[in-house]
Image: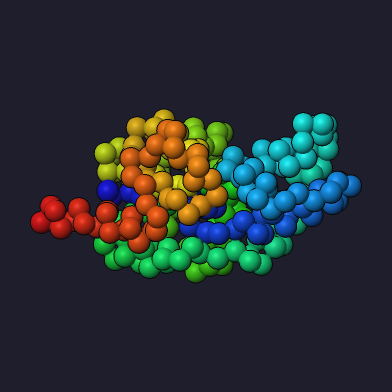
Amino acid sequence: MDLLIFDLDGTLIDSRLDLANAVNATRTHMGMTTLDNERVYSYVGNGAPVLIRRALGDQAAEAEVQEGLEFFLEYYREHDLDNTTLYPGVKEALDRFRAAGRHMAVLTNKPVRMSRAIVEGLGVGAHFFQVYGGNSFEFKKPHPIGVEALRKEVGASREATMMVGDSSVDVHTARNAGILCCGVTYGFQPETLADPAPDLLVDRMEDFADWVLAKDGDQK
């Protein structure tokens, strides 16, 4: 594996509480009651517009969804590092990949400027040659456009590229791009990894690093 493409929320970072707080602040702003945090977590993965549409419900008019989205983005931008942290072992795994000369990138459906600010704020921005978000391209994941752009930037083959994520969105992205996928069980939506199943499933990011870097030894 020469190119490792990571999802952000639920894969590298535990942002659940900050996302839930921002969603519930948005609902309060719109005159609605708050939602249980676990319910909000189940809405994450397809980008902010889908998150807010789900959070406001089918009865919300398009104008209300747009108002809610604008409020959410402004609120979340100011609070996106209040409680958000890297998952245990992520920094150590990224350090190992960088030492081994792997190309690493982030491909998320979260807005790109926000995503870059978060990885920088958590001290891992320098590990990634690129961070792409849900508004970086015409299409979001699971469309393969982001994977294709990253592959071209480093000249990586499909066989040497792997997607890492916590939900079926990431598995579908990998399948659509013709690359391998690793699922992590500690994220937001591990239950969605059953179908379609990823090529590799790990409980810790260190386990993924062990798997990738063990192949170096196999080839020596």
Q: Position of residue 147 (x, y in %)?
A: 42, 39
Residue depicted at x 55% and y 37%: 140
Let me know if residue 165 appears in the view: yes
Is residue 76 rendered to the left or right of residue 194?
right
Single out the residue that lies furthest toward the right.
Answer: 31
Q: Is residue 140 above or below residue 116?
A: above
Residue depicted at x 52% and y 59%: 13
Single out the residue that lies furthest toward the left.
Answer: 220
* Quadrant of image for the C terminus: bottom left
Residue depicted at x 57% and y 43%: 45
Is residue 108 rendered to the left or right of residue 50?
left
Q: Position of residue 183 (x, y in %)?
A: 41, 46
The image quarter containing residue 77 is bottom right
Let me know if residue 144 appears in the view: no
Q: Nearer the viewer, residue 94 or 33?
A: 33
The image quarter containing residue 116 is bottom right
Residue depicted at x 34% and y 37%: 179
Q: Position of residue 93 (x, y in %)?
A: 36, 63
